[in-house]
Amino acid sequence: MSAAREARLPPATLDAIEAEAWTLLEAGGRSFRAPFHSGQIASIGADGPNVRTVILRGADAAGRRIWCHTDRRSPKFAELAADPRVAWTLYDEGSRLQFRAWGHARLHHDDAVADERWAATVLNSRRVYQVQDAPGSTSAVPTAGTPPELDDSRWTIDFSERGRAHFAVVETVVHRLEALYLHHAGHRRASFRYGADGHRTAADWRVP
């Protein structure tokens, strides 16, 4: 096992904290070995807030955007289609650093964005889009929901294309980002706001 990363105080300036935050998010979106590769995303449903863990599939510092993937039949997709307000929390235990992001969701499923990200999705990750019933459907028995064909030699890239119709990209346009550094010598919290064009409109220190 690799040595645990030590909690540390943040950079001294708001500009440096913001730059580090987006650098870490971009790294998390590129590699499953990086901190912040997974996080929680919250949407608003008919019964109130719903939170689930997702994989961070990409981040763009210049455009203030982050992405995850989902099944277009999922409750998450329907909730964000009805109400695009969305919030994220990503936490790294090793560094004791937390990011929270708020924004609105853009859904991609029949466009070039979805096509590009589907093409970059590896074979094993395509399995979840082969479920026969919608995610969250009731089942009489424990099940992965996938058809028997996924367990034999027919599971190939060509066969996996059957899942493309269910694949969707959730793009979050970030309006607000917060970084919280936990440290025994004193926590630090910073907040950043962005306009519709992605430019920063405010930056503040906050009481942790």
Image (cartoon, helix red, strand yellow):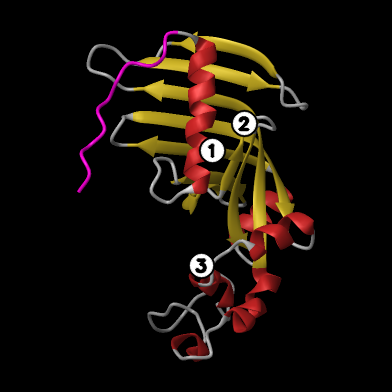
Q: Splitting the image into 4 quarters, where does residue 113 fall?
A: bottom right
Residue type, label 1:
Glu
Q: Which residue is mark 1?
A: 26
Residue at 47%, 45% (x, y): give it. Answer: 40
Q: Splitting the image into 4 quarters, where does residue 165 fall?
A: bottom right
- Decide: few, some or many residues near mark 2? Use Cα within 10 Å; few <14, some 14-19, many ≥20: some
Residue at 60%, 63% (x, y): give it. Answer: 74
Q: Give the main secondary structure, helix, strand or loop, of the magenta stretch.
A: loop
Q: Secondary structure at mark 2?
A: loop
Which sits earlier in the primary sequence, circle 2 or circle 3?
2
Q: Nearer the viewer, residue 62 or 98?
A: 62
Q: Position of residue 61 (x, y in %)?
A: 62, 31
Which sits earlier in the primary sequence, circle 1 or circle 2?
1
Label 1 and label 2: CA atoms lie apart by: 7 Å
Placement of the C terminus among the 4 image quadrants: top left
Give left or right: position of 202 versus 15: right
Label 2 and label 3: CA atoms lie apart by: 25 Å
User: Is the residue under label 2 in contact with that under label 1 (CB below 8 Å)?
Assistant: yes
Q: Position of residue 126 (x, y in %)?
A: 55, 70
Q: Position of residue 79 (x, y in %)?
A: 65, 53
Q: Nearer the viewer, residue 77 or 68?
A: 68
Residue at 61%, 25% (x, y): give it. Answer: 176
Q: Which residue is mark 3?
A: 125
Q: Which residue is mark 2?
A: 61
* Magenta highlight range: 1-12
Where 148 falls versus 158 (above or below)? below
Give left or right: position of 176 versus 7: right
Which sits earlier in the primary sequence, circle 3 or circle 1?
1
Of the numbered discs in the image, which one, if any, rests on residue 105? none
- Decide: few, some or many residues near mark 1? Use Cα within 10 Å; few <14, some 14-19, many ≥20: many
Label 3 and label 1: CA atoms lie apart by: 20 Å
Residue type, label 3:
Ser
